[in-house]
Amino acid sequence: MQLRLKNLIFPLNKKISRQVLVLALPVILSNLSRVFMSLTDMAMVGRLGAPALAAVGMGSMVVWTILSMGISLRTAVQTVAARRLGQQRRLECGTALHNGLLMAMISGLPLSLIGYALSGRLAPILLSDPAVIPLCADYMSLAFISVFFISLGFAFQGFYTGVEKTRIHMNVTIVANALNIYLNAGLIYGSNGVAGFFDSLWGGSLSWVGLAWAWLPFPALGVKGAAAATLLASIWLLIHYLLYLIVPEIRKRYQVHRFRLDWQMMHRQISLALPLATQELLVMGSFVMFFKIVGMIGTAELAATEVVFSIMGASFMPAAGVGQACATMVGKFLGERRPEMSEISIVESVRWSLIIMGTMGIIFFIFPDRILPLFTNDPAVIKAGIVGLRVLAFAQFADAVGITLWFALTGAGNTIFPAVVDVLIAWCLFLPVSYFTGIVFGLGFFGPWFTFAIYILLFASLMTWKILQGEWKSIAV
């Protein structure tokens, strides 16, 4: 693959560029709704104070670590479904979904139960602030239950994205996230307090929004309410995905109503998912430790890290949508035995990701003092967050490349190399250097965040090198 700088500015192939955007746009909108939900969560929880914000930050990071199995199954289902779509073996697309659902049930249920049982013991290990520990335990106890439903949802997401029905994923996610936001406000503040919450925003001009909760009494659960809202929304997400299986086009073309298992295909899906599950588990675990290191610096710094990570999703999730579209097109074109079209798809996907994340990076750098007050009114959190957000701004361009090429490799069937690289960088560079710069050398909040930027740059460089090698074109799935 030969790349020139102009290929990252002007389309290499306008038709493929449009196909990437058309396929990615529903996923981008879906991911943006998830980002909006996450940012709204932070805005709502942030009004409860820095301890509540730090508790939700650590708790959600732990829960997403456990969800790594579900994310890996999504990729395994999508990779196989997209390849079979290109090979015109549509019944096997449905089989890929059935295999994924079985694997999600087998892995998701015990993870939910174990996490729920251990949430009270995990919080004191990960946190040292006595004001934050009980809040974090409350949040995790309910949030862990949603792991089972979200894992099944990931299998559906992989199937619908793999067969190029990304609009279904968009519709389901937007509705579930809207429900989550609605329940969040009521369950966090209670039906009596939700009007006061909206009254405190934008000079009281939104107080009328609180009337939407007046018809039904909601208890004020605080941090635990945020987890309860996530659980209820995840249950609806699964139901909504199931309802789309009866749509004639899906039901007849892929025969999804006839439950079939293919053990040889399942073995291949497991071999795809296992490296990704290990990667997600260990890398997300490294971020939990990163949060712990930042928490050793201070509670305000930990709260600021949670806010900045949530804002980071505003640029990461749309680029991930482009990446998912890229993975589908790479798999489909390889199934059609047109690897040159896969290459063009990768170039066009990287270009769109750079446009999206680069734009967000510029906004983060110029307006951090305007963005952060939307999520917290704590001056110490805002001050620390400005540093993190500006460091993040510089990492956006490299992250755009790394994210997209990660999806390209996994879509082609290479999940081992990205997993090994990510884990080694995270544990051998990111965490040790974060600790020494932030704690030992006394650089404070800036040290870990500067190290995070180096981590992103190195990962993107290695993904680029691997794609340019071209070995991914000959992988059998």
Image: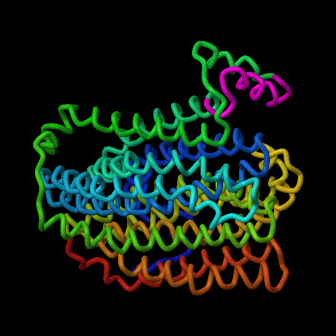
Most frequent secondary structure within the magenta stretch:
helix
Viewer-proximal residue among 126 and 453: 126
The boundaries of the magenta stretch are 187-204
Kindly identify the residue that appears in the image at 60 percent across and 47 percent down.
138
Q: Residue at x 51, y 77 (%)?
A: 4
Horizontal and vertical percent position of residue 441: 82, 85
| For residue 149, above or below residue 162 | above
- Of residues 144 and 25, the one nearer the viewer is 144
Q: Position of residue 337 (x, y in %)?
A: 20, 69
Q: How is the image coloured?
A: rainbow
Split into 4 quadrants, where in the image is the N terminus?
bottom left
Q: Nearer the viewer, residue 357 or 419?
A: 419
| Residue drawn at the location 38% of the way across and 49% of the way down | 148
The residue at the far top in this view is 215
Percent position (x, y) of residue 309?
66, 58
| Residue nearest the viewer, comparing 44 with 249 | 44
Is residue 155 rendered to the left or right of residue 263? right
The image shows residue 196 at horizontal and vertical percentages of: 78, 24
Vertical relation: 327 (above or below) 249: below
Query: Residue 200 lies in magenta, yes or no?
Result: yes
Where 99 sits versus 265, above or below?
above
For the point 60% across and 37% down, which residue is it?
225
Counting every numbered tag in the picture gives 0
Does the stretch in magenta take in 46? no
The reply, left or right, for residue 132 in relation to residue 423 is right
Q: Quadrant of residue 447?
A: bottom right
Position of residue 431 in the picture relative to residue 412 (left or right): right
Q: The C terminus is located in which quarter?
A: bottom left
